[in-house]
Image: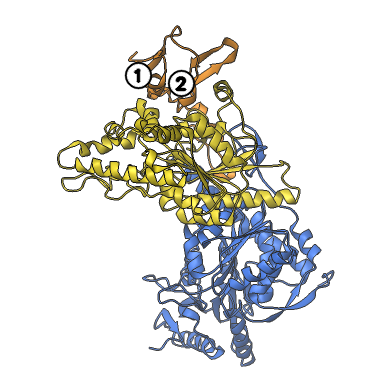
Amino acid sequence: MSEKSWKEISIGAVCWKPSTALLTGDWRTYTPVRDPAKCTRCLLCAIYCPDGAIHWKPERNDIEFDYNYCKGCGICANECPTKAIEMKLL
Amino acid sequence: MQSEWKFTSKDIAEKPDLFMSGHRACAGCGATTVLRLLMKATRGPTIVTTATGCMQIVSSMYPYTSWAVPWVHTAFENVAANAAGIEAAIKIMKKKGRVKHSHVDVIAIAGDGGTYDIGLQALSGAMERGHDFLFVLYDNEAYMNTGIQRSGGTPLGAATTTSPAGTVVPGKLETKKPITEIMAAHEIPYVATASPYYWRDLIIKTRRGLEVEGPAFLHVFAPCPRGWRTDTAKSMELAKLAVETCVFPLWECINGEYQLSAPSKAIALSPEKKKPVREYLQLQGRFRHLFTPKFEKLIDEIQKITDQRWQRLLKKCGVSASKT
Amino acid sequence: MKNVIKQKVVALNGNEAVAYAVKQSDVDVVAAYPITPQTIIVERFSEYVANGEVETAFVCTESEHSAMTACLTAALTGARTFTATASAGLALMHEMLFVTAGCRAPVVMAVANRALSAPLNIHGDQSDAMAQRDSGWIQLYVENAQEVYDTVIQAFKIAENPNVLLPAMVCFDGFIVSHSLENVNVLPDDAVKAFLGMRQFPTVLTHDGVKAPFRLDPEHPMTLGPAAFPNYYFEIKRQQVEALKNALSVIRQVHDEYAELSGRSYGNGLIEAYRLEDAEVATVCLGSTAGTTKIVVDELREEGVKAGLLRIRTFRPLPVDDIRRALQDVKAVAVLDKCISFGGFGGPVFHEVRHVLYDLDKRPVLVNYIYGLGGRDVPPWQIRQVYEDLKGILKEEKVKEPVNYLGLRE
């Protein structure tokens, strides 16, 4: 068992791992796929994403889907003003 | 009110998430979008406390945490008292030179159960005592964490597991408690409603709530696909429709002065923009039974109550009712 | 005792003694809600605040539930915190008592023991605190206003010890102690301050992978009060067991250190054995009843009866070895309970003492007396009757009734 004993953990039930270690992307059924040609980089998808799974990369002036966390809810596709995102069963 | 904070969507997207990815919320959870945006609006050292509920459980499954800021949960009914204790401690320890930050913001977060119902006493007490903190209600209109039971925030006609739509009872028989008006009646300096669809408005209001000295109350609409029986992709659309139908108007009450926020003001000025509640209800499984001959009349009732509440709000905001 | 610090004598009742001790303990946050017979504590403390005699954030909450909550989160933010309650107030705190202990928040609370409703009763018995004995708190039961004063100060040092880091309640009988005026020796302010020092914080591992002082501090973000499911809940509870175990030695150590400073001691801090060395018959009790019983024991000793008394000062953690050692050679023991455990076999103190003695090869005969409920007075002659009963048991070598009611009209 990988879990620690009571002597090995800090007192007070202080959390000792960030949830970013939990890859919730494996919950996903449909996957958002973007058409970069239609995308205006308005960032609405990144703002609305409940999972913080769409990152803005200023150095590339572009967004990036983080499929480690994307649960496939489809909010990004629903809200995209140019309909640049499609939910696909991959 | 302090100087308005100017920001672009890039500023918001670039700001690191203080409510981190990997949380265990359902896909399409409106409340998590609310929390992400809320945390993007923070202005410096911040301590967050959350009542028992969806947002607590999905973000703090030991040994994991989704909180990049100091965060504490203690129980369900007392998050305002959590905030009161933290605020009092920070204030006195700062005076004694044991807190080096010039200011630490305190945010209390609760769902509708922890606000409208079991949490109301602690909330009212903390507001009356004038503690300097922001209370954020993410309202998904039922006890979602325990499996969709009715709350004081559940709207009329909604089916929940304790107000099911049966053959004779059409879901919840009572209307949604006007919690924000109740908080405004506490005469605290800042009270507002917000919807995550209008994300800029939500961020501005969060910042105002933090900047104001004394208690602030922010009521945020939080669609819940699981509990509302809605498409996970539609959470933001519903957050928009609730405002467009005036089911959930956006307004502020600053030092006792009511004012409509831009999206609702636009409807007040052009009443033809106001959409019928039917458009909002029909997207949701929790209202499905209303679209049957037996319970159809309740839709008219919901429309009537929505209109009455909207008219009352317009009056409070000094907008002539005749215009609408 | 040598090197005892010069002290002043002040006339204080038990409640005022609490308020005075809290005033001297440089408490950061007091959050409380008034309830009889504790109200004087918050009233006196409010006066200290109003007169600028303390640097304390005083939060007059809307309920005891919020009072305990605010103390809990203030303590987790790094503050020294205090509250006081009784009876229904303690019952309302019930949920938060477990959370406070589970969160390892060293809150100190004074409990002016009072009966629980129904019927409503404002007078003293220990039903309120006994109902909370499994909440994970340290429970100290004291005898008089002087001990109240001394123990409140000690409680901060015990609770805040990094090897303990648990909340502590100081229990004293409502009205009998809370409202009786006594001459109380008080230490100089700076002596109390020096005795307590600043709060210490153990180091914990955070989600950032750093070790940081255990408190809510924007400098080192950490998550407290999470949900822990079957994979970790048990381990976290086991840590609390260890902390209470550690508290046994810390309570003694703090008691001894304080005794050196003040010249006052209460047994070894855990138990007080009164004329027990060669005792054949003895009673066991908590709180102010010990004062009455000591007089009776002295009288019986004058009469040649080998009588003794064991006062349990620390009830949680239970000083098992100390109780065993104190009672192992006594022939017959009567345990006095100012509380009923409905449907159980006797009162809670009886349960514990009888249980602890079970493993002895040769153990005393034990009987239980429920007494003083709802503030019913227990005069010395009734205590004397208990000793007479014990003598009868020894003579007849038989216990007629193991659980008895003292001072009840049959």
- Residue B86: where, in percent of width, then height? 61, 49
Determine whether C391 is above or below A71 in the image: below
- Residue B106: where, in percent of width, then height? 59, 44
Dot 1 lies on which element? loop
The crowding category of the residue bearing disc 1, from other C-alpha atoms within 10 Å (few below 14, some 14 to 19, many at least 20), is some
* Residue that sits furthest to the top in the current view: A37
- Residue B89: where, in percent of width, then height? 65, 51
Residue type of the residue flagged with mark 1: Tyr
Report whether residue B16 is seen: yes
Check the residue under mark 2 and report the chain it is in.
A
Determine whether C405 is above or below A21 in the image: below
Q: Which chain is orange?
A: A
Front residue of A26/C379: it is: A26
Name the residue: 51% across, 73% down. Answer: C126
Q: Colour of chain B?
A: yellow
Q: Colour of chain C?
A: blue
Instruction: Determine which of the numbered discs, if any, sits on residue A30 in the image.
Output: 1
The quarter of the displayed image where residue C84 is located: bottom right
Dot 2 lies on which element? helix
Residue type of the residue flagged with mark 2: Cys
Instruction: Determine which of the numbered discs, if any, sits on residue B109 in the image.
Output: none
